Image (tube, grey):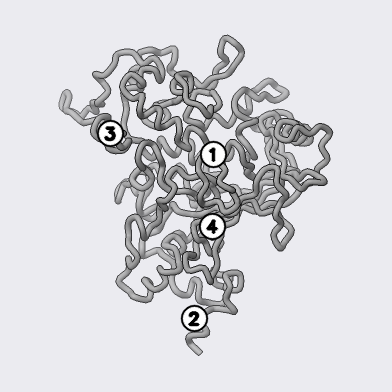
Amino acid sequence: MKSTLFFLFTALLGTAAAAGGAEKTVYAHAGYFEDYEGTKTCLECHKDEAKSFFHSQHYQWEGETPDIVNSGGRRLGKMNTINDFCTNPAMNWIGESRNEAGDVVAKGCSKCHAGFGLLPAKEISQEQLENIDCLICHASGYGRDLYAAGDGSWEWRPILWKNRAGLNSVSKRISLPKRKMCLRCHSASGGGPNFKRGDIEYALADCDSEFDVHMASSGNDMQCVDCHAGEDHRVLGRGTDLSATDSPGTRLTCDGSCHGAAPHEANVLNHHAKRVACTTCHIREFAKEDATDMVRDWSMPSYHEEVGKYSATITLQKNVTPVYRWYNGTTWSQMLGEEVRRLDDGSVGIMLPQGSRNDKKSKIYAFKFHKGKLPVLDGRDWLIPITVEEFFGTGDIDGAVREAARKVYGIEGVKYRWADTARYMGLFHEVQPAANALRCLDCHNAGGRLDWKELGYDGDPLERLMK
């Protein structure tokens, strides 16, 4: 099968042509079809690509887990694990949640799925292939909204579905995914702009080199796919707190993928690069424009009068300094239906990077440290997800926990308590140019960034060398 990246670049990318004295963009798909009739139009030429995408993480929200040390070979992902943001999408998939005034306050987690509303199935079918929304990733200016179907089900449709001429125009604006296309889901996840990741902000769509040296519009102008595109819709890279990977056996790193093991002119910096990840020095802070969610307490409902919606109590923060931990490319993950693992402070570790000073495969990485509070089943010590979509409209957190316990574990009359949770989320975006990178004394100084004892040292190693 052709490489998706190569195929799209050669066959689909638009070209510019002059018209009336001004440059007009002429897209390659302009002459391929007249009327866009949903994904079946795309399938006439791209059925192999659709089959490939069906099996990808972007569609299945599950995948292979070679880097999860306690996965036991299971296929895992958003659909069958728990997180401390909206907890689990499978039970919060699609539909309108309304408040007491009748206003729509939520539409389901499938809002950020590359499909029209069906849950991804394990087995491929024509229905599943036609459920793939190709335009959400490949068409500039495309948008969609939730509509009720005639049988009472819900589906995502292009907002121009009643405007045939407009939809036909947008559906031909086909290109490789641009930053804006990726950001509309990856920056919006978690309930608000930059809430979840912290280092993937809308500002990356058009930023300067001081914000991100790679994606600066007037600089390197790199697109997300420049680093992450793999073969046949298989994305390269795995966030440290994600379960699955589309590219088992291939790890996306700065040194291995672009810059080499000795990227600096100074030997002392190259020596550091052996055990310190590039991003540790080149991401001084994150959430530089939009505040990010640092604590999400589901035990305390918070009402937002301006939108008539409930949420967890969320602590937002801007210009956040990362925390630093050893990481060897693998992660321990707290599973549903398994006894919780408690850290030294009593909190439940949800996603924990693996590695240590004595592990030569480990480097010191920068992380967003996210705290949460989730329900834990009495007697079994299992984390319980939450049916958050209904909660957003009613504020009934107890009912949302009980409903989730019925759906996930088949337990009626559940008894539970609340537990603090901890998740480490790797930082890889908003990279600073060399002039803005950390300096020696940012770490090797009293009150510096690094907790040397936490990292396995008796104290600052530079002080020992200077004695």
The reply to whether the C-beta atoms of the residues labelled 4 and 2 are less than 8 Å apart is: no
Label 1: how many Cα within 10 Å (few below 14, some 14–19, many 20+): many
Which of these two is toward me, 128 or 107?
128
Q: Earlier in the sequence, mark 1 or mark 4?
A: 1
Is residue 267 shown left or right of residue 392? left
Residue at numbered disc 1: 189
Find the distance from the CA under tag 1 to the CA under tag 3: 29 Å
- Place residue 304 in its image quadrant: top right
Q: Which numbered marker is on residue 367?
A: 4
Residue 346 on image: x %, y %? 74, 58
Q: Horizontal and vertical percent for residue 460?
A: 54, 78
Q: Which residue is mark 3?
A: 7
Real-space CA distance between mark 2 and mark 3, rounded to the nearest whole angstrom: 51 Å
Give the CA distance from mark 1 to mark 4: 18 Å
Looking at the rendered image, the disc whose residue lies closer to the viewer, 2 or 3, is: 3
First reached walking from the N terminus: tag 3 or tag 4: 3
Image location of residue 119, percent across then percent down = 56, 26
Q: Does dot 2 land on a helix, a strand or a loop?
A: helix
Amino acid carrying label 2: it is Leu
Task: Measure the C-alpha gap from mark 4 to mark 2.
Answer: 23 Å
Q: Amino acid at mark 1?
A: Ser
Does residue 241 sit above or below 157 in this rendering? below
